Image: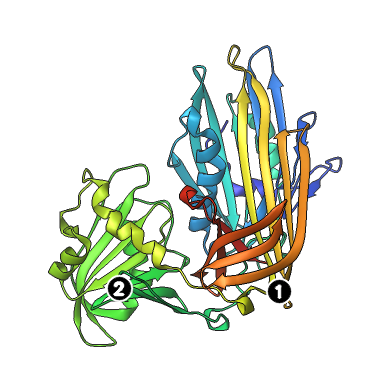
Amino acid sequence: MKAFVFLLLMACSLSPCAQQQTYDLITFTPPAGWKKGDLKNVISFSTTNNTTRAWAQIGIIKSTTSKGSVEADFESEWKELIIKPYQQFGVSEQPLGIDTQTFNGWKLWTGLGKFVFNNDTATVLLNTFSNGQRCASFTLMSNTTAYGTTLDEFVASISLPTANAQVENTTTNVTTTASTPGLFQFSTTNFDDGWTSVAKEDWVETTKGNTKVFIHYPKEGTIFPADPEPLTTAAWNILVAPRYSNLRNYKTAYISTYNRPYLGMGTATEIASGKEVFIVLYRQGQTGWLEFVTDDKNSFIREFKFDPETIQWDSETDLLKPLEKMVNYNKFAIAESDLTGTWTSDFTGVQQLYNVYTGNYAGMNIHQSNEEFVFNANNSYEWNLLVVSGMVGNSKFDQVKSSGKFSVLNNWQLHFSKIESGAKTYHAHWSCIKGARLLHLLDAKSPGSGMYKVYGKR
């Protein structure tokens, strides 16, 4: 299979006999004779040659709300669609290569990965389209080049609506127009350890004494596959530089680990106050970019317990835990008036199966769930959980519904009169993103799991 397929192929005209199909935003012509699997959020086409042990598979994933840029969308899709399902087979944590294209106004990022099973190397290609509002992806994978022509023809058949067209919100993720911080009752949180968080238009601003931390919302051009220095500098120029002047002693650093931390730092003059400050810009894994502002470097060291200028590729990642935990200060109390509307949470897990004796492809196991809360103004609610799981082509469908009355026990807890078989209480809070909020719920009876479900407003 070719490492990268250039999007100019998509401009090729289809033969008159080609039978096109449309799934969500992507229109395509499926390979003739390949087995089709159709579930809620993914459609697949696969073929297997039991004699040669050759196989190939195409997956088209239902679109989601964009995280603001094609770089952020690709990084998220790589983690969810490639790393999680294929990690046990040694798939590349980072793409082995990146190709970028523009098609019909959409930005496309294509990344290549490999994994090994039973001494057989397979290649997986993730293709992510983004227009900054919607994100759509498809995957190509095979353990041979024998299907290269067929896969190229499939790519050539793909089309999408123009990127600036009005696209229906086909998923239940949060939208950028659902709400703004000013529409919620609580936009300030005073934490017991002395930190105070305030929801702002482009970040959550967290302060303690003279120390400030800006928890930046995702922004185009600040997350993309690149070496540490150009990535950190690009984010610095977009998120930090406009509010400062006279930057001095700027440098970048990183630590080589599976979720590589990126740091940029320097001394500059704060334009708003005319004050000289020391700044550290940091991102690791899914934290997003966090900006730390102190009076000087020594003040930073006293607060966060390490000297950022000593960080190098082989430093201990535990040094950065005081920075990483600051993302948890994007947390705000709830009120009954905030909840009215529909809030949903989606989950998709994909597992590729292979015969342990022959290495032949044995199908795909998928687990998908959609959970929905509808809060009404009279404190009534409807709750619905939909689950699809099992082997592609033989999946089972389950649905559970409840309704009743809800109440806000305090600023951080929600109570429901019935969820499934009985009453249930959740620990609850908001987090902020650009122009919207996300609802976090954790079963109060099992808080030790630490697994908050996150719901976006539809």
Identify the residue at image location x=16%, y=63%: 301
Of 375 and 164, the residue lying toward us = 375
Of 298 and 283, the residue lying toward us = 298
Furthest-bottom residue in this view:
273
Of 34 and 307, the residue lying toward us = 307
How far, Cα to Cα, is label 2 from label 1?
A: 34 Å
Of 417 and 455, the residue lying toward us = 417
Q: Is residue 1 above or below residue 380?
A: above
Residue 25 screen position, x and y as percent: 72, 55
Residue 442 screen position, x and y as percent: 54, 56
Side (left or right) of 120 relative to 381? left
**Mark 2 falls on what kind of element?**
loop
Furthest-left residue in this view:
298
**Mark 1 falls on what kind of element?**
loop
Identify the residue at image location x=48%, y=72%: 332
The amino acid on which the numbered mark 1 sits, given as a three-letter code, is Asn
Instruction: Categorize mark 1 by other alpha carbons within 10 Å: few (<14), some (14-19), many (20+).
Output: some
Instruction: Categorize mark 2 by other alpha carbons within 10 Å: few (<14), some (14-19), many (20+).
Output: few
Q: Is residue 120 above or below residue 316?
A: above
Residue 51: image quadrant is top right
Using the image, tell me which numbered label, if any, was put on residue 194. Answer: 2
Residue 94 screen position, x and y as percent: 43, 42
Query: In this orientation, does residue 195 appear?
Result: yes
Identify the residue at image location x=48%, y=66%: 220
- Say which quadrant the N terminus sits in: top right
Using the image, tell me which numbered label, if any, was put on residue 379. Answer: 1
Side (left or right) of 243 relative to 390? left
Q: Nearer the viewer, mark 2 or mark 1?
A: 1
